[in-house]
Amino acid sequence: MVSELIGKYIWLIQTISSSGERGLSLEELAERYERRFGRTYSRRTFNNHRLAAEEVFGIVIECNRSTNRYHIPYFESALDENDSVRWLIDTFTVGNLLTMGKERLSGRVSVEDVPSGQKYLTAIMQAMDDGRELEIEYSKYRSEKSDLLHIQPFAVKEHERRWYLVGYCHERAKGKKGNNSDRDAWRVYGLDRIISLKETGESFRLPKGFDVDSLFYQSYGIFFPQKGQKAVTIRFRASVRESSYLRDLPLHRTQEEEGADPGGNGSIFRIRVIPNDNLIMEFCRHADGLEVLEPQPIRDAVHEKLKNAAGQYEHQ
């Protein structure tokens, strides 16, 4: 399975990186591999995994010819330049540790379930890698009927414990079928709403210069910017306690801290983003720990949501 292979590539990266500059010999790697996976580790298999680690993650495993030991030069620097690779390696590593320690640490490790990532994520990533179109049966939250859609899988994106597929949908192409640069046909689909999925055998190529992070850079969550929408600067005050949380986990990638609140009530932050309902709900989620200062329409929208919520509790 693809997920099993990726797990082995990441095991190799982590095992060699943890050995530092001295590295490991093939014999030492083979011994650890056999202990971990219960199989012998041939030189051919190792070389295949070594090449895959470079192709998939951009991590180069070098051999010191004077000692015949393998190491990863500038490992931390390479990861710092690619946050998505670090995230993927960390995720698989934690997953492996949880699996290995399930019995020994029973009742001592708790993680939140992410249902949407369990069934179709691997198949979608394989189709992305192979450049193959997908046929999915998809059910929207607001519809009792499902749709049969033909998708070119451009990317996957995780948001608030859900995985999403970003791609070009032929059925939404408005007469421009086959031209995947038509932005009107780009859509986002929640993996937990996919009923069935299979490859069609049709090939595709990514639009030139496509980058999923750039695509959503000024958005909040998984909403595409609509025509005519522009980002606005939103300033908000966060309490002392909430400010600490926001420094560790920013509300948005554009978040900047202006400084301490003149009134001594925490700190002032700003983000530059295209507003949507999800962002309004996120502000509401922080309750009295966060106050939107400007622009006024965003402040009014948050106030209206909170007022309506409070109104539900006023009548006993």
Image (cartoon, helix red, strand yellow):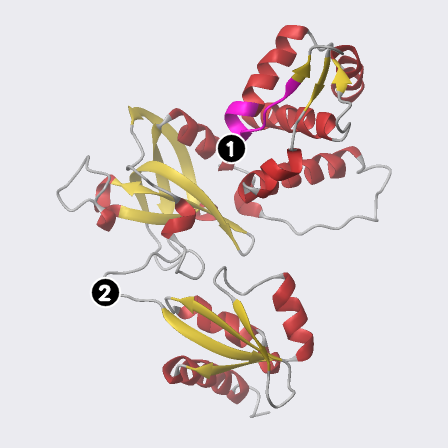
- Which mark, by number, is residue 228? 2
Residue 223, relative to residue 17: is it above or below? below
The local secondary structure at tag 2 comes to loop
For label 1, the crowd category at 10 Å Cα-Cα, with few meaning under 14, some 14 to 19 and many 20 or more, is: some
- Which mark, by number, is residue 122? 1
Q: Residue at x 69, y 38 (%)?
A: 95
Between marks 2 and 1, how big is the CA–CA gap?
35 Å
Residue 264, relative to residue 221: is it above or below? below
Residue extending farthest to the left is 175
Residue 278 appears left or right of 258:
left
Among the 4 quarters of the image, the one containing residue 92:
top right
Residue extending farthest to the right is 104
The foreground one among 243 and 315 is 243
Boundaries of the magenta span: 54-62
Is 92 contained in the magenta span? no
Locate residue 148, reporting x and y percent.
30, 40
Amino acid under label 1?
Thr
Residue 168, relative to residue 232: is it above or below? above
